[in-house]
Amino acid sequence: MERKIYVHSLSEMDELANIISECIRPGLIIGLAGDLGSGKTTFTKFLAKHMGIDANVNSPTFTILKIYPRTLPLYHIDVYRLENIGYDFELDDFIYGDGVAVIEWYSYIKDMLPEEMLTMDISMINDDLREIIIKGSGEYAKIVETISNRYRN
């Protein structure tokens, strides 16, 4: 299932993250794509907030992985630096772990990821407007449907 939405403000990105947070479960995988500054980390900050994480969430570009422990942990993964270098990092335990894995630049490790996952491809239209194409198959299609029914665009 696929849905295109438009996000006009930080409060709308927060609303989107809140809707998705209500659908999370152990083992959930969210792949984020988009240019630098498009809102991948901003979305992750809002998702973390709605998961009850009060830590300072920032991009793990240089560390590859940041773990935010909770009852349902958040694994924030940024694979930007892994493009064209293979899979030297042992990320399977986190991608396929018991928490929620949010993977920025997911297409760089697409061969390593399951077919069923939630993806959000974010395009910057201008400074204030983002177009997000959200896709999900299998159980993830239910999340896309929930977004379709609840996100006001």
Image (cartoon, rainbow, N blue to C red):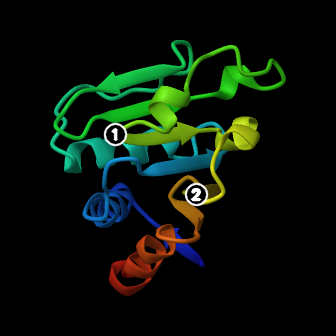
- x%, y% of residue 140? 49, 67
**What residue occupies the far bottom of the structure in this picture?**
149
Q: Position of residue 10 (x, y in %)?
A: 36, 55
Whether residue 47 sits left or right of residue 76 in the image: it is left
Is residue 153 visible to the viewer in this orientation of the structure?
A: no
Q: CB of mark 2 within 8 Å of CB of mark 1?
A: no
Instruction: Tell me the residue that label 2 is attached to.
Output: 119
Q: Locate the N terminus by quadrant.
A: bottom right
Disc 1: which residue: 99
Label 2, label 1: how far apart the Cα atoms are: 17 Å
Callout 2: 10 Å neighbours few (<14), some, many (20+)? Answer: many
Label 1 crowd bin: few (<14), some (14–19), many (20+), radius 10 Å: many
Residue 131 versus residue 92 in the image, above or below: below
For residue 16, what is the image quadrant?
bottom left
Q: Say what amino acid the circle numbered 1 marks.
A: Gly
Q: Which residue lies furthest to the right in this view?
A: 84
